[in-house]
Structure formats: C-alpha cells, structure tokens
Amino acid sequence: MSLSNYLNKMVSRDRSPDRPPLDEIFWSWCGSFLGIALIALLHVHFLTPQDLILVIGSFGASAVLIYGAIASPLAQPRNLIGGHFLSALVGVALFQSLGDIPWLAAALSVSLAIVVMQLTKTLHPPGGATALIAVIGSDRIHDLGYLYALIPAAAGALLMLLVALLINNIPKTRRYPLYWW
C-alpha cells in the first residue's frame, strides 16, 4: 500500500450523526445519575464516606454506553458484566505477577483484557480501564486482590445493569437489552 493510499484512509467521507432527541438525552441523564448514585450511596451507607472504591472510574464510561448508547453491541448485559469481571481478573493477575514493573503490568493488563474480551464475546471498552485500575489503583484496590473482580467490578456492573433495565424501558422509544447472550 502506498503512503497516499494509507493517508487517504484517514480522510472523512461522512458527516457526524445528528444529536439525539432531547427525550433520549433526558433518559440517558436519568439512568447515568441513578446508576452511579446507587453504587456511591451503597458504598457510603455500608462502608465509609471516604475513598469510594466501589465507584471505579470505568463505571463512568459504562454509564455512557448502557444509558446513552443502549443499542450498541458493546452496551449489552453480557458485555457489561463479562467485560468488567474478566478484565478485573486480568488486571489483578498482572498486578500480582508484574506489579514491580508497573509500566509493563499496565500495558499488558489492557492489551490482554482486550484479547480476553474478544475471545469471550464480552468486549466492553470500559473493561480496559477496569483492568488498568487493578494495576494503577490505590493500595485499597490492590489489597482487594481477586475480590476486586467481584466487588467492585462485577457487583457495580450488576447494579448499573439493574438501573439500565428499569430506566431504559420506561420510554416507548427505548428497549434494553437488545439481547442477553
């Protein structure tokens, strides 16, 4: 392939999609607010008001998908739960085996999480962040060990899924999930 053909692949030929209708934006806001609030409130109520370790950063990206892009294959329940859980396992394994070489553990955690998600048909982009958090997170995250895959990763994803099922099916214009398995 010539350089010009390669660079030509980067030229845009389409225009960006239209903005979603305001009612879709409203329901996306409701779902994302309630999903993250539920996890944070459970943490504050049952654990401690500081260091919300149940609210991992990758849940913010999951909220975008499961409340704002509900028709995406990446937003379906199998991808949400499996992506977080499997990626957390990968991240913990890499931290425990290569934590003394953080740059390598970080890079491998994300790249191997992608491979595992692709092989298991659970690709969920926030899963890459879940794996990375297992490596670069605080000592409180590291102290969880493999429990990190269950709490917060899988448990938080399940709580967000519950909210997605309730909120996304209220308006007549929405249906979630498109498929379970």
Image (tube, rainbow, N blue to C red):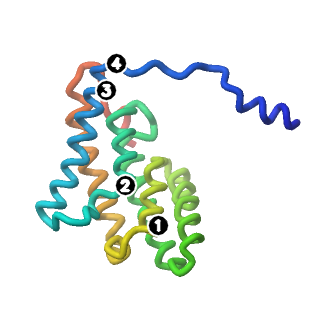
The crowding category of the residue bearing disc 1, from other C-alpha atoms within 10 Å (few below 14, some 14 to 19, many at least 20), is many
Report if residue 145 is visible in the image.
no
Q: Is residue 59 above or below residue 169?
A: below
> Secondary structure under badge 3?
helix
Label 4 close to label 3 by CB (< 8 Å): yes
**Amino acid beneath label 4:** Pro
Label 1 close to label 3 by CB (< 8 Å): no
Label 4 close to label 1 by CB (< 8 Å): no
In the image, which is nearer the foreground, mark 1 or mark 2? 2
Q: 11 and 108: which one is in front?
A: 11
Q: Which mark is residue 20?
A: none
Residue 65: % across, % down? 39, 39
Q: Which mark is residue 21?
A: 4
Residue highlighted by disc 2: 57
The crowding category of the residue bearing disc 2, from other C-alpha atoms within 10 Å (few below 14, some 14 to 19, many at least 20), is few
Q: In which quadrant will I find the N terminus?
A: top right
Label 2 close to label 3 by CB (< 8 Å): no
> Secondary structure under badge 4?
loop
Q: 4 and 76: which one is in front?
A: 4
Q: Between disc 2 and disc 4, whose residue precedes?
A: 4
In the image, which is nearer the foreground, mark 1 or mark 3? 3
> Secondary structure under badge 1?
helix
**Amino acid beneath label 3:** Ile
Q: Which mark is residue 25?
A: 3
**Amino acid beneath label 1:** Gly
Residue highlighted by disc 1: 91
Residue reaching furthest to the right:
2
Label 1 close to label 2 by CB (< 8 Å): no
Spatial CA distance of label 4 from label 3 is 7 Å
Spatial CA distance of label 2 from label 4 is 27 Å
Spatial CA distance of label 1 from label 2 is 14 Å
